[in-house]
Amino acid sequence: MGNYNPTPYQLDLSYYPHLVTDTIPGPKSNALHARAVQYYRGLSGQVRLFPVAFERGQGCMLEDVDGNQFIDFSSGIYVTTLGHCHPKISEAVAHYAKQLMNAHDFTTGIKVRLLEKMAAILPGDLKSFQLYDCGTAAVEAGLRTCRAATGKHEFISCFMDFHGKSGHAIACARMTKFSGPARASGFYMVPRPDTYRPWWTREDGSLDTEKYLEFYDSFIQESTTGQVAAFVLEPIQGWGGSIMPPDDFFPKLRKFLDERGILLFADEVLTGMGRTGKYLCMEHWDVLPDIVTLGKGFGNGFPVTAMAVRTPYADAVDKISASTSYGGNPMACAAALASIEVIEEEGLLDHAQELEILFKKRMADWTTKYKIVGDTRCKGCLLGVELVKDKKTKEPFDAAGKRVYQKAFRKGLAWIPAGHILRMSPPIVMPNEVAQRGMDFIEEAIAETEKELMG
């Protein structure tokens, strides 16, 4: 592995981050944001907490309209996994922007090359694909495929997972505030294992995976009609706060579902394509899902997503009217293929695992060093830090989360809040020294916040 630092991403740490305005966000950011919110509604929590206006990015650096330059620990909400404006990916998109932008679902050479590459890198018999332009569309297609493949119509998903923002994707995800029924009929939610906040434990206090499976079994028998097509879940929760399962969960869940004729649908829109050091996060547990969705880092910022289906269920894709207007257009295929090639050529799966070691080492003593840090977790370049008011009660500390987020941003770190959980998703191209600097800012912000709020 070694100290990764390719030329496009070299940063002079004496210069980056480089803050030039007295206040952050600066005056131009504030003015531009004020103009935008006259018309643009529904902003995310991270923008509301820190309304900076960005203008450009390169590698692991983001620059705002005032000229302030930040280290990027968000990857544009898990999207620019390979950094901003990687030359190979930008050139690939530009080439097809000049040659052929869209041909509906007709065959193109670049599409065939992408499909062949996907078949080569994905595990097992995940060999049938359809391409989309957003994660929600891929998830919706996956749900339709599960119904067509099984002849069943019900789905089980997990509390605090996130699968998209349209009807059935929402029904698989967290509760959304709107009038009418909370979720569509036939969609059910169950708890998933969280080692920091377990629902069921053994006598020694450790999480008991078997108890979760026992609950799932009784739930299916008592609360469904027995027509469950698939269990849908994220390998690691993203929106929920980088919640990671115990290592025995997915192997046992796979066996549990096989015994009941239920498909395993892994939503890897966030976790896939190198984010955790594997093409699929599920590979960490040697588990092969029946349906997989990919997105976000799949095209490194270009809107391209995919549904992958195992060979036994491939014919079902032909039954669901799977094609879309924008999915698989030449620019999208070029971005996705170039992204995979960059991962291969630059050894980025190995580097993501090297960064995991670095991040875990940095956070190893935070739960003992800081009163407000209840838990830390990391898989590749997917990190979470949970802040609590009391370590015994584990009461969430939302005020601390907001303050740490804002403090680190003002130091020059662009990243992601989630209430009391700090989320980090640095690009997997990040040099080790830059990763260390980003962690410095987070730890400083935690220490300062603890002193201010706890005394």
Image (tube, rainbow, N blue to C red):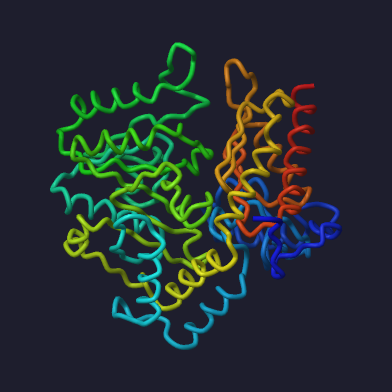
* Residue 301 on image: x %, y %: 53, 65
Q: Quadrant of residue 315?
A: bottom left
How many numbered marks appear? 0
Farthest residue in the top direction? 203
Q: Residue at x 65, y 45 (%)?
A: 49
* In the rendered image, the vertical position of residue 399 relative to residue 284, given as above or below: above
Q: Position of residue 42 (x, y in %)?
A: 51, 52
Q: Residue furthest bottom?
A: 99
Outermost residue, front side: 1
Q: Is residue 453 left or right of residue 235?
A: right
Q: Is residue 199 above or below residue 128?
A: above
| The N terminus - image quarter | bottom right
Quadrant for residue 83, please give it: bottom right
Residue for point 77% across, 52% down: 24
The answer to whether 443 is drawn above or below residue 169 in the figure is: above
Residue 200 position, x and y percent, is 41, 19
Q: Position of residue 121 (x, y in %)?
A: 41, 62
Q: Looking at the picture, tell me which residue is in the foreground, 300 or 36.
A: 300
Q: Nearer the viewer, residue 438 or 310?
A: 310
Q: Is residue 262 left or right of residue 430?
A: left
User: Could you tell me which quadrant the C terminus lies in?
Assistant: top right
80 or 308: nearer the eye?
308
Give the residue at x 58% y 21%: 394
